Every structure is written in C-alpha cells, then in structure tokens.
Image (cartoon, grey):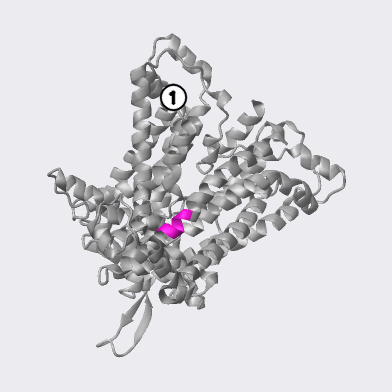
Amino acid sequence: MSVRTSGPSRSTTKPRPIQGTGGRTAAIFLVPFFTVFLVAMIAPVVYAVGLSLFAEQRSGLGFGGAETVFVGLGNYVDVLQNDTFIAGFARLALYCVLYVPTLLGVALGFALLLDAVVAKARRAFQLLLFLPHAVPGVIAALIWAYLYTPGVSPIVSALASGGIQIDFLSVHLVLPSMVNIAVWEWAGYNVIILFTALQSVPREVLEAARVDGAGEIRTAFSIKTPLIAPALGVALLFTVIGSLQLFTEPKILSTATTAVTSTWVPNMWAYDAAFNRNNLPQAAAASIILALLAGLLSWVVTRFTSKGNSR
Amino acid sequence: MSTTSSIARPTSVSPSVPADGAGAPPTRRRRRSPGGGIGATFGVNGLLVLGSAYMVLPLLWLVFATTKDASALYGSDAFTWGGAFFANLERLLTEDDGIFLRWLGNSVLYAAVGAIVGGFVALMAGYAFDKFQFRGKGALYGAVLIGVLIPNTATVIPLYLLAASLGVTNTMWAVLIPAFCNPFSVYLARVFSAGYLPDETLEAARVDGAGPIRSFFSVGLPMLVPGFVTIALFQFVAVWNNFMLPLIMLQDRQLFPTSVGIFLWQSQVQQNPEYLPLVIAGSFLSVVPLVIAFVMLQRFWRSGLSAGSVK
C-alpha cells in the first residue's frame, strides 16, 4: 500500500525550511478529516471495546433490574464459544474460499481476453462488463433473488424444461448462489483494474516473447499475468476485505428463503445480537472480533503480496 | 504519450479509477501479431460476448419485469413485455403518499452531501500528506491506511452503539457523519495530488507571495478538480449503495434511503405478493439513474483525466 509520493522530485531538492509547509499549516488541512475519522471510526471502536468488557447481569428472577458488571474478556469467550457464531464463521470462510479465487479468476480471464490482440470493441465490452457495478448491492441481490425463485425465474424454468431441477435457494446451494451474486457485482470492477495494469506491460517484453515463439495464450499466462502481480495483489486485498463484509446479500436472500437464517454470517449474528437478543456487549464483541480478523487478514495479504513483488 | 502515462500511473495503483481503462488511448495498443487466426478471433470475442450477456441479462430481466403486474410476473415468459409499466410506476409513486420519492430524495441528499463534504475533507487531507512535511506524518498516514483496511460493516455496529448512547440514532446525521469519513478517499487524494499537482507550481505560487491556504484554493484546487470529481463520484456511489448503516441507524420511514425502503417492501412480499411489483419498479427506478450517470460520467472522467494531464 505504499504510495509514490516520496518521489525523486522531493529527494533531489535540497532540504528547505520554506514557511508554509510545516506542521501548523498541515494541521489546518488535516483537522477536518481527522475530526470525522475520530468521530466515525476511532470513537465507535473504542466505545465498542469498552462496552464489550461489561455484561448486564440480572439478579434473581430478572425482576430486580439489571446491573452492569465488568467481565473482562468474558463476552469474547462467550461469542467464540457460541455455536451459531462459529457456524456463521465457517460459512463466511467457505464463502471466501469459493468467492475470492472465482472472482479473481473470472476478472483475470476477462482482462486477458480484452487485452488479447484479436479482441474487438474493447470499450463497449468494458462498459458492459462494468455495468453491474452501477447497481446497488441491495438491488443486485434482489434481482438475483428473483432469478433464483422458482415460478418467477426464467433460469429455473429453462433448466426445468430441460429436465434439470435445481433449487438455487436450498440449504446446500444458497452459498454458491450468493458467490455468484458477488461475482456478478464485482467482476467488472476488477476487470478494469487488471486491464489497466495489462495496458502498461511494456511492448518490448511481449515482442520478445513472441520472437521466442510463445503463443498468445502462453504469453497471457506466463508473461502478462506475472507482470501484473502488484495489481492482482491490490485486487486480492480489496476482495478479501470486501468478502468479510458479507451482509447485504444474505440479508436480502433471507427474505426469499428460509435456508438463510438470521445469524447466517458473523455480521448478521452481530445484528441479531444487537436488535433481536438485545445483547449489546456481545454485538460489540462480535464486531471487534471481525475487525481484528480483517486487520490480520489484510496484514497477511499485504505481507504476502509485497514479498512476492520485491523478489 | 508521456502525459497519458503520467496519468495512467496513479490510477493503475488504485483499484478505483475504472474509467481510465476505458479511456486508454488507442495508440497504446500493440500492433496486430500474426498469432491471431479466425478461430482465435471468434473464441476471444465469443467469450467476451458471453461474459457481457451474463452481466447485462439480469438487468434486462429487471426492465421486462417492471412492465408486469404481480400475476404476470409469476406466469409469463420473462423476456416479454407486459402492459403494466405505467400502472406500476404510478402505483410506486403514489404508494403510502408517495413515500418512494421521499426515499429517493433522501438517497440523493445523503449521497450528494456525503460525496461533496467527504470528498473535500479527504482532498484537503490527501493534499497535506502529499505536499507538507511535518512530524508524525508517517504515523498519521498509517492510521489512514489502517482505516482503509477495516471493513465498513465491522464499524457499523460500534457506530450504532455510540450513536445510541449519544441519542442521535434515527437522525440524518447518523447516516451523514459516517459518510464524511472515507480513508480510502484520502489515499486516492494523495495519489492524485502527487500525480496532478507538480511541487514547482506551488513553489511558484509561494514565491509570488501566496500563503498556504491561498495556494491551495487558487492553485492546487483548480488542478485537482478531476481528482476531486473522481473521489466524489466514488463516495457518492458508496453512500448510495450503503445498506447496513442506514438499516441499523434509522427507524423512521421518512428518513430511509431507497435501499432500506425497498428492503422494507421486499420483506413483506412473502405475506403479500402485491408488494412484488413495487419492489421491482422501485429497483428499476433506483438503478436507471445510476446506470445513466455511470455511462455519462465515464466520459466525464475520461475527459477530466486527460484535461488534468495536459495542464
């Protein structure tokens, strides 16, 4: 995630104590952002961490009112020992395992196709591939929910007339169905990133590969793909972070099928804890666990990809 | 040539400037190599057509579905016109005293204010990170990057908990203030500031006696307009698409954005199928402006980016 700001222009100029580039003026420009950052990110997380260390305990038969007691990491232990939370996590993990390679594979495939010498009408194809990204997640999930619903869906009825009975919304298929929705939403976006990277692959390298007798397909996978590894790394990072956010699609599909329960993924579990079970400390603990996991995963991905690049 | 590559570089770092790929100048294309026979041409373009069909057909289904009433949706062929288009729209716009227009207005308000204020706040911060030297810069920028890596949804429940303790849930501010905070926009702004705004230009302004604030508004800002537009557009789309935050924060239907409003209707379809045409027509009406905007703004980005690189 390093940014090319400390470029040569800065390092070649001699150190100059010019007024108006120091901390006091920088503060004027930074204060607005860090104010909202503090209010909308740091304070909520700190508050949630604080809240997650306490629990409401009811005395006696529950009529005596609740008192708040410090329980340390007790809520975290409870959340991590909760069967539905763990089941949700397992589903999320399975979703990531299916979604991340599928998405990157599809996106890389289309980017390479667009970059192929024989590809026509590149602009039109890019626009069409990107179009689903203009559709809000809620609407995308709704469209697909109906495309999965027997009776409404042309896909289901076409398959049925061909003798294939598939219930996309059944317990076993709803997760791959959800992967499909997310791929539909995000493939085009990643195609554009990877295609942009492919465009900057030096022509000489490809010429050399051609002279050496490498065909188009060989060039695509052995020359172009390794050369856009940094862009693939960025796409991987944002895809992993994005897949941990999973909430909208299952929430929408839960209105169309009973296969998606109210605690289907960790985000839904936390939502359910806060609004149906009224256990705010546990909701806070679940959110913190998810944020920590996201931080850990993105750290691993960044380490992994930057290591790959430096070699 | 040099101008286009200087503009392509910052965008290829970031995953969020897809328009650039579409705007890549045709001169950069490699010459036709002898590798592509007629079979390859058909294969590559055939796959691209299939991919585009996968992306576009669900949207086309939505268009056709909007023309049908509830019974026709369950009965007829998916890709035929029904006669209920105007009846559906009329019902959509009059249902519940025209609450859908209210939701649409709310969405526009949240997204536009979030994009403009949030974009500007991020632009100032990115500019400061790029152009100023000050103590603690690395640590502060590290905080921004950590903010980028934390999934949005992981902070939603903490935000709700904090807002609830302050008694500001169910207000517009509960949705707007988090929309102002987008660390990724700061990252983008820093990249744009480094790419569009040469240090020498600011140096010249300084020599002419302009203070740092004045330099920013009279020299920096005009040159950063294309970057600002890109950042604001991405933020607009992000806020427009946001679902979990408004779903959790808002209870008053008058404050809902379209995403939450349509979800409310969708959750009633199971009991009352008469809500189905409302859900479909509402989805259609909230997608159309975005798709049109996307197609038009893609052009704007392209010209904005190239105009920025010429100056």
- Based on the picture, tell me whether residue B149 belongs to the magenta stretch: no
- In the image, what residue occupies the spot 53% across and 21% down? A202
Element class at badge 1: helix
Q: Residue at x 46, y 73 (%)?
A: B98
Answer yes or no: is residue A75 visible.
Answer: no
Q: Position of residue A297 (x, y in %)?
A: 39, 47
Which of the pair A295/B48 is nearer the observer?
Answer: B48
Q: Quadrant of the N terminus of chain B?
A: top right
Crowd tier of the residue under label 1, counting other residues whose Cα lies within 10 Å: few below 14, some 14–19, many 20 or above:
many
Which span is picked out in magenta? B284-288
Expressed as whole percent of the image width and height from the top left, the position of residue A205 reads 49, 17
Q: Amino acid at mark 1?
A: Lys
| Apparent side of residue B246 relative to residue A254 in the rendered image (left or right) | right
Residue B18 appears at what percent x and percent y?
51, 40
Residue linked to disc 1: A224
Mostly what secondary structure, the magenta segment? helix
Q: Which residue lies at the image location 76% right of the left edge and 47% below the top edge?
A: A21
Q: Does the stretch in magenta take in B286?
A: yes
Direction bottom: furthest residue: A64
Q: Chain of mark 1?
A: A
Q: Is residue B243 above or below residue B305?
A: below
Residue A69 lies, in percent from the top left, at 37, 78
Quarter that holds the C terminus of chain B: top right
Residue A172 appears in the picture as rendered: yes
Position of A90 compared to A109: left or right? left
